[in-house]
Image (cartoon, grey):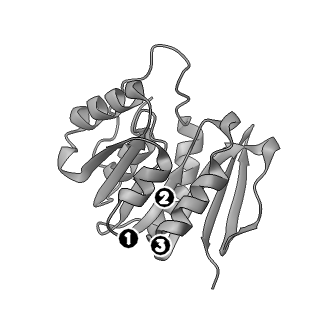
Amino acid sequence: MRIIAGEFRGRRLKTPSDYSIRPTSDKVKEAVFSIIMPYLSEKTVMMDVFSGTGNLGLEALSRGASRVYFSDVSRESLHLVKENIRMCGAEDRSIVLSGDFRSNIARVSEKVDIYLLDPPYADGYILPALDAILDSGKLADGGIIVCEYEHRDGLPAEYGGLEAFKDKRYGKTGVMIYRKKQ
């Protein structure tokens, strides 16, 4: 697993020794960032809600995001995230939050431009995470939520004041991108 583009391009990230964490493939990651690049600038604040190895959040920092909140409940994941942040020299733009995704979403004190949701597929966390984001009131105006999910499970086109404007499939992986309804 590596950083594809930007400041940290080519850096190899540490990965788990087993399959307890499922990092986003380079193919899906490149597709996601192709879609969200118009929303990414040097002022962009992001949250990698189920960060795993930090793969997506570090790609965002490499491509110019100003700050990324990395969130996970797993000790192994948090250790990998911290190691990968250190390897990229991104400590000054990274905030690591330990604990349940709901409490971590609520702990962020500023507006978030892009939320990245790539939870364990079988656990059904996407809709509860969307609820937590909406309840927090921290989705910035014009902000988006990127959801990676198992395509056969599907996600609704509209949910709690959000509307999907992209739904792509990459093999078994689906990527749904939501924004606030206008």
Q: CA distance from mark 3 to mark 2?
A: 13 Å
Tell me residue 112's x, y (percent).
40, 66
Tell which tag, 3 or 2, sits nearer the viewer: 3
Q: CA distance from mark 1 to mark 2?
A: 10 Å
| Residue on which the image places disc 2 | 115
Q: Is residue 133 left or right of residue 122?
A: left
The residue under the point 68% across, 44% down is: 149
Mark 1 / mark 3, whichever is N-terminal: 1
Is residue 102 shown left or right of residue 87?
right
Identify the amino acid type marked 3: Gly
Mark 2 Cα shell of 10 Å, populated few (<14), some (14-19), many (≥20): many
Element assignment for label 1 = loop
Side of 33 relative to 176 (left or right):
left
Whether tag 1 and tag 2 are in contact, CB under 8 A, the answer is no
Task: For residue 35, say whether it is visible.
Answer: no
Toward the viewer: 61 or 160? 160
Q: Earlier in the sequence, mark 3 or mark 2?
A: 2
Instruction: Classify mark 3: residues with Cα within 10 Å, few (<14), some (14-19) or many (20+).
Output: few
Determine whether 107 is above or below 98 in the image: below
Give coordinates of residue 111: x percent, y percent: 38, 70
> Dot 1 corresponds to which residue?
111
Quarter of the image for residue 73 reads top left
Q: Which mark is residue 137?
A: 3
